Amino acid sequence: MSSPFRSRPAPQGTLRLFRFKGIDVFLHWSWAVVAVIDLQTRHNEYRSPIWNVAEYLSLFAIVLLHEFGHAFACRSTGGRADTILLWPLGGVAYVNPPFRPKAWLWGIAAGPLVNVALIPVTFAASWYFGVEHAVRPTDFQRFVSTVTFINLALLIFNMLPIYPLDGGQIVMSILWFFVPFERALSISAYVGMAGAAVGLAFAIHWGNYWMVAIALYAAWNCWRGIQLAESIRQMRRLNEPSYARRGL
Ligand SMILES: [Zn+2]
């Protein structure tokens, strides 16, 4: 996911992991809590628990590569991107692209394109290590097959056309070619709100608390999108010409 609405997150509760090409990568404290819960609840998947750790780290490595895709694409259009935050619901690249639909579209599409690029890599690894035909797969073979699945699942989930997921933001950027920004944003955010409501209903029905958290987070993002669209609309009404230049 990428968040074009802020260029820098509050550093509270985060740990700076490293800096790459001028992009600071922060990790939120809650990541460690969820990692411990995840590792404790899934300890039967592998013979050796070290593979659970490797799997969890791989998930975040894939998410991190995806976020770097957003950040570098944003920079390639002349925008600013200097922060990536990793937290249990994934990653957020704080990007400030130029206020043009083409620049936004490329900045958003580049994230999922990283996952697309990883598909042949993970499938080649699965094939090379004979994952498919293993009768009694080793821990390593299970790990390779799970990472292949994780990358595909992340791609499919991110590409759902529901704002604020990447797929929904791609739809928004395409709409923006035809209608003003605030209209494209509010349409996408209302569709996203409906999607989040449906997701929340299913999540409660299935008792999946993880999905509840994701649906609420999505709904909150949609709410912010709707409010932003409304304030831009008001600025336009007041004939405030600098709303775009001032950034979001
Ligand atoms: Zn993304």
Image (cartoon, rainbow, N blue to C red):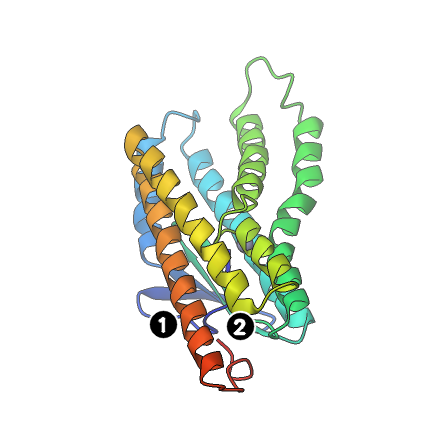
**Residue 19 appears in the picture as rendered:** no
SS for dot 2: strand
Depth check: give the residue in front, 139 or 207: 207
Dot 1: what SS?
loop
Residue occupying the point 60% across, 55% down: 170
**What residue is drawn where x is 35% and y is 33%?**
202
Q: Is mark 1 within 8 Å of ligand 1?
A: no
Along the horizontal axis of the image, is 66 left or right of 215? Answer: right
Rendering quadrant holding ligand 1: bottom right
Mark 1 and mark 2: span between their CA atoms?
A: 13 Å
Look at label 1 and name its amino acid: Ala
Q: Position of residue 10 (x, y in %)?
A: 36, 72
Query: In which quadrant of the rendered view does residue 46 lie?
Result: top left
Q: How many marks?
A: 2
Q: What label sits on residue 82 in the rendered view?
A: 2
Q: Nearer the viewer, residue 232 or 142?
A: 232
Q: Position of residue 159 (x, y in %)?
A: 57, 45
- At a point 70% along the width and 27% down the height, the residue shown is 127
Q: Quadrant of residue 36?
A: top left
Q: Is residue 46 above or below residue 163?
A: above
- Residue flagged by tag 2: what amino acid is it? Asp
Residue placed farthest to the top in the image?
135
Picture layout, residue 117 above or below residue 181: above
Earlier sequence position, callout 1 versus callout 2: 1
Q: What is the x, y in percent for residue 168?
A: 53, 51
Viewer-side residue, 68 vs 230: 230
Q: Could you tell whether 202 is left or right of 50 in the image? A: left
Asked whether residue 120 appears in the rendered view, the answer is: yes
Q: Residue at x 61, y 58 (%)?
A: 175
Q: Which mark is residue 10?
A: 1
Above or below, 106 relative to 197:
below
